[in-house]
Image (cartoon, rainbow, N blue to C red):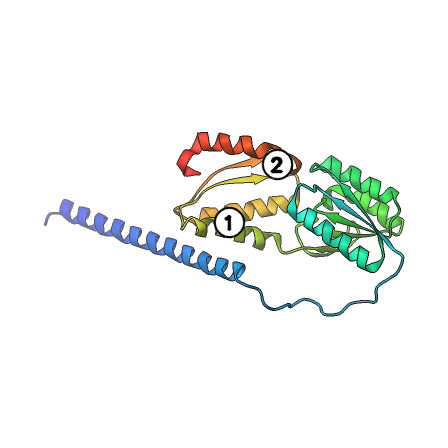
Amino acid sequence: MNSLKLGAAAGAMALAGSLFMSTAFADEVLDRMKADIARSVGPQTQWDGPTDGPKAAKDKSIAYVSLTQNSSGNADSARGAEEAAKVLGWKFTLLDGKGTATGGADALAQAIALKPDAIILGSVSIENNKTLIKQAADQGIVVIGWHATDKPGPVADPPVFTNVGTDPWDIAYTAGEYAVVHSNGTAGVEVISDRQYPIVVTKTDAIEKAVKECTGCTLLSEDNGPFGEVPQRTPGLINSLLQRYGDKL
């Protein structure tokens, strides 16, 4: 066998080995994601949260500032807060930011003017409203976040008693994994985002990372726009994406 044939044979063997390793890696990634999703969507039969708490205070008032009630997450959280306030005998007020950063800030300013004992920020950005939150704290109003920044727990500056939330990276990465698993590793993904909020940046990046780790998947594009406009924009956006990508979507 001459050197040319030897070189061709070696090249073919190297290519075959590379393809085998690539396929094995892709299978390994998909298997890992399938296991992650099986754990995430399986039945949850145990409560591992707190089983007791402080004695309930009486005659308090609370304002819930929602970034947008068009979001089922915000709407459900607000409803839960209202139900809890009713059980406690507290006055409850809901203010809707209508899905924009300006609307959220305006709703927060209105909440402060009501002089409640506490304010819950439902996805209203802590980082974007430092001045207003400090103003609330100066008036003795306790501020609590619900998915209001990219990490759960207390915030020192501005003073927020705690931010209630899951790890945004983990939950968004899992959402990306779900798209991969649901398509059996062939997903064409469009990400709808609103990158003016740090927590959304974190979630968007996590979703896209999961999709990019799937060698048989394609991140088609990313659409950015105000969350409050998503219900109105989505039908037209879907039609546009179907025309642009067809069966790839």
Horizontal relation, residue 100 to residue 224: left or right: right
At x 72% / y 47%, what residue is drawn? 122
Badge 1: residue crowd in 10 Å (few <14, some 14–19, many ≥20): many
Q: Position of residue 38 (x, y in %)?
A: 48, 60
Horizontal relation, residue 16 to residue 59: left or right: left
Kindly identify the amino acid type of the residue bearing the numbered disc 1.
Gly
Q: Is residue 123 above or below residue 89?
A: above
Q: Position of residue 187 (x, y in %)?
A: 43, 45
Q: Is residue 66 visible?
A: yes
Horizontal relation, residue 151 to residue 81: left or right: left
Q: State the SS at label 1.
A: helix
Please give the residue where the numbered disc 2 appears in the rendered image: 231
Which residue is at the front of the view, 114 or 43? 43
Horizontal relation, residue 43 to residue 12: left or right: right
Residue located farthest toward the left when viewing the structure as drawn:
1
Which residue is at the front of the view, 224 or 154? 224
| Gap between marks 2 and 1 measured at Cα | 21 Å
User: Which quarter of the picture shows residue 98?
Assistant: top right
Please give the residue where the numbered disc 1 appears in the rendered image: 176
At x 46% / y 46%, what residue is drawn? 212
Badge 2: residue crowd in 10 Å (few <14, some 14–19, many ≥20): few
Kindly identify the amino acid type of the residue bearing the numbered disc 2.
Pro
At x 89% / y 49%, what residue is drawn? 139
Of the numbered discs 2 and 1, the one sitting upstream in the chain is 1
Which residue is at the front of the view, 167 or 130? 167
